[in-house]
């Protein structure tokens, strides 16, 4: 993994090759970095990596752009003008950290530790560090994208099976149900799309559920172009078909589940004709897809974040979990395998949740409303920003943001701006001057993945990511957390150095960091049917088809579909969204390799919609979610890959280099989102399934 070899280039200058794990997205592909005289000169996929098998996407190829970008922040900055003005002066690291530590200590003394919020974006393998700092401080308030990303799926799985599951592509599933996920393009969660494609080469059939006809959907045996936001109804309807047709695994249901009869009664309301009307799918297609999945000898469901961004988020994932369970596909070869973590101090142990007193945990913002999200330790952004603005239930004074451009990623952008304006202290740790960084009091320049030592932990492996480059003036988020812990008198809960922390994390494997770098990659070997020996990790030891724990919290014990409000004639289209494959969430818009192919945000519309609205390909339009309200500027792309009533907008868009926050965010779809419709369990915002209208762009608007 991290062994090196010497090669010779035409110039006869020796090239050293270092193996690592890419972190330009959440995938974890193997990477080989070429160095000449210790300087990275090229990067490409590692053909020996058993996970990615040499695959390397455009984001990974832009890693050296990120390392060398002239736009990188390389010195701490302190604000000198009004918040949001973007006027700063450079200061030393010591001055910046001393100010942050002093102000955090003062607000903790005056308002309590809960007045401090830690924020982060998509995990860069330092999420457990952020939570450890929060728990050591005593604040229950950590905010991030969990509610619209991975955690609805994680918590639905835990509340059903007591554990998290993942697709066993190596087990040669007969059918893969790809639901709200475009795995060959996104390569998320350490489960690289290459594994799915290899399974297809060996004979696996793919059924895709996606409002858009992606390349994957076009190559699937069946494509269910579901109406955005109606997936929960589809899953419940499929459960009813399975039960009515007798296609469920009777032995598994009788022996390892509880609540089957009650589930059968619950799904009677989701008859095929009703589900077809809700989802916009042909009844025959729904029945055929259900039959293919339920009768497959081996089948798994790859559920993606497309399901997590609407008011049915948790119930959708739980309905899918129930479908997989009654078909007997849990912890089975080629099915949905329960994650059995390796013995390292990682995502579960390293955050030190024991440091957070129970009385502090009860103060978590929104914990009384979105109890399942609160169980995972997260705060929903809407709950947080409303608390900041209103001062209720207590003052929130300070926010430290690690690797997140919250003005472009959090829902209800205007509320986020109001919240940032009200805070006493905003600290942003990032690589670039983002719209969020413009609103900071202190900015700390951070390092890229090529500039840090980390242990990479996924369900299928752990690996070593070694530091191979340095950008003067930048520090890793982990190093920043160690410095802040020292200034807050919390060093006893941390480590004298990053190296000592890495050694501690590996102690369960009886390895040091130095030893691990020589090994590089350790596969997490799968074991199937673990429940036969130890049952499921639920209170009953069975799969909770009916969940009385949810009932005790005031929720329904079964998933239900909540329909959207009545259609507004001024908003005739349903907007869904996705990130262009060359970007990752809100990142990489300033890198040449990733940005050269697309310079503006696009909205895909059906040819019939284009004719109806009088629009042409490449024309600028504004999307709006309230008649007469400010629009979000998009460039039209005409394609029959979406239905006539559906528009598909690029998500996570912002324009680097603009002189104002408004200009920078003019194409951010989160300007169209609000707090009216969110998931009751997780606080998941409705970012997909938003009713919108389209109008030609007007000068000065958008």
Image (cartoon, grey):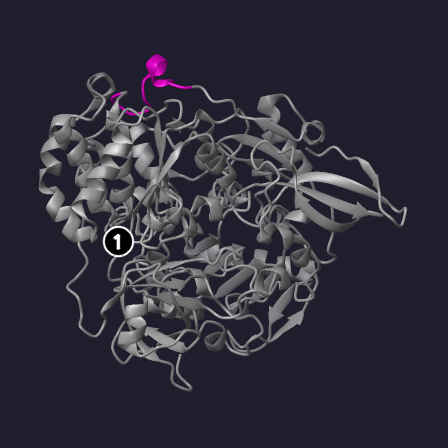
Q: Main secondary structure of the magenta part?
A: loop
Quadrant in the picture for residue 258: top left
**Considering only vertical position in the picture, is 551 above or below 645?**
above
Measuring 35% from the left and 77% from the top, which residue is drawn there? 615
Measuring 49% from the left and 50% from the top, which residue is drawn there? 122
Residue 429 can be seen in this image: yes
Q: Secondary structure at mark 1?
A: loop
Q: Is residue 534 magenta?
A: yes
Quadrant in the picture for residue 386: bottom left
**Considering only vertical position in the picture, is 619 above or below 188?**
below
Expressed as whole percent of the image width and height from the top left, the position of residue 384 reads 36, 57
Image quadrant containing the N terminus: top right
Expressed as whole percent of the image width and height from the top left, the position of residue 536 reads 32, 22
Residue 559 can be seen in this image: no
**Going by the image, does 388 lie left or right of 508?**
left
**What stretch of residues is rendered in magenta?**
528-540
| Pick the front one: 413 or 322 | 322
């Amino acid at each position: 993994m991290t062994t090196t070899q010497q090669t010779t280039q035409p110039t006869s200058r020796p090239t050293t090759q270092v193996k690592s794990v890419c972190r330009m997205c959440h995938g974890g592909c193997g990477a080989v970095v070429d160095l000449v005289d210790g300087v990275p000169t090229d990067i490409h996929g590692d053909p020996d990596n058993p996970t990615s098998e040499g695959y390397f996407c455009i984001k990974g190829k832009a890693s050296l752009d990120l390392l060398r970008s002239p736009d990188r922040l390389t010195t701490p900055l302190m604000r000198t003008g009004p918040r949001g003005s973007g006027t700063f002066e450079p200061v030393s690291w010591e001055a910046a950290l001393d100010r942050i530590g002093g102000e955090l200590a003062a607000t903790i003394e005056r308002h309590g530790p809960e007045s401090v919020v830690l924020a982060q974006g998509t995990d860069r393998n330092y999420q457990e560090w952020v939570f450890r700092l929060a728990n050591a401080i005593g604040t229950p308030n950590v905010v991030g994208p969990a509610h619209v990303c991975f955690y609805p799926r994680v918590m639905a799985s835990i509340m059903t099976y007591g554990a998290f599951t993942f697709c066993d592509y190596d087990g040669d599933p007969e059918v893969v149900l790809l639901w709200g996920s475009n795995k060959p393009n996104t390569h998320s969660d350490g489960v690289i799309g290459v594994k799915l494609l290899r399974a297809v080469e060996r004979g696996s059939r793919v059924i895709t559920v996606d409002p858009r006809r992606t390349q994957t959907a076009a190559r699937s045996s069946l494509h269910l172009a579901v109406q955005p936001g109606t997936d929960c109804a589809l899953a419940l309807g499929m459960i009813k078909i399975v039960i009515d047709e007798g296609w469920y695994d009777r032995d598994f249901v009788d022996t390892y589940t509880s609540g089957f009869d009650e589930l059968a009664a619950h799904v009677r309301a989701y008859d095929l004709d009703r589900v077809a009307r809700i989802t916009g799918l042909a009844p025959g297609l729904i029945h055929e897809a259900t039959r293919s999945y339920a009768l497959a000898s081996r089948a798994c469901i790859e559920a993606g974040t497309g399901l997590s961004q609407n008011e049915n988020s948790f119930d959708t994932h739980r309905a899918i979990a129930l479908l997989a369970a009654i078909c007997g596909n849990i912890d089975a070869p080629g099915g949905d395998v329960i994650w059995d973590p390796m013995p390292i101090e990682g995502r579960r142990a390293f955050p030190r949740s024991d440091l957070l007193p129970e009385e502090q945990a009860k103060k978590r913002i929104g914990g009384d409303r979105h109890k399942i999200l609160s169980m995972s330790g997260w705060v929903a952004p809407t709950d947080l920003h409303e608390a900041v603005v209103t001062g209720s239930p207590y003052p929130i004074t300070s926010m430290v943001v690690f690797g997140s451009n919250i003005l472009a990623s959090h829902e209800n952008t205007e509320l986020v701006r109001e919240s940032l304006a009200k805070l006493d202290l905003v600290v942003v740790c990032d690589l670039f001057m983002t719209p969020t960084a413009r609103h900071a009091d202190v900015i700390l320049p951070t390092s890229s993945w090529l500039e840090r030592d980390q242990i990479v932990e996924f369900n299928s492996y752990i690996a070593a990511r070694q530091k191979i480059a340095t950008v003067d003036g930048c520090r890793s988020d982990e190093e920043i957390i160690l410095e802040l812990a020292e200034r807050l008198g919390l060093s006893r809960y941390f480590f004298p150095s990053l190296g000592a922390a890495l050694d501690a994390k590996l102690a369960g494997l009886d390895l040091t960091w130095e030893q691990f770098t020589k090994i590089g990659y350790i596969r997490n070997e799968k074991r199937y049917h673990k429940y036969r020996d130890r049952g499921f990790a639920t209170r009953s030891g069975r799969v909770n088809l009916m969940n009385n724990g949810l009932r005790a919290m005031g929720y329904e014990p079964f998933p239900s579909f909540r329909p959207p409000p009545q259609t507004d004639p001024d908003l005739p289209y349903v907007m869904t969204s996705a990130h262009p494959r060359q970007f990752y969430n809100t990142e990489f818009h300033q890198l040449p390799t990733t940005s050269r192919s697309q310079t503006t945000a696009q909205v895909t519309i059906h040819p019939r919609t284009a004719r109806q609205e009088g629009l042409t390909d490449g024309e600028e339009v504004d999307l709006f979610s309230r008649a007469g309200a400010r629009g979000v500027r998009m460039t039209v792309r005409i394609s029959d890959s979406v239905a006539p009533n559906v528009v598909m907008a690029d998500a996570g868009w912002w324009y680097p280099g603009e002189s104002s926050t408004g200009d920078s965010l003019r194409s951010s779809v989160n300007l169209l989102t609000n707090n009216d419709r969110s998931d009751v369990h997780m606080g998941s915002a409705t970012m997909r399934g938003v009713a919108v209208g389209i109008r030609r762009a007007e000068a000065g608007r958008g």
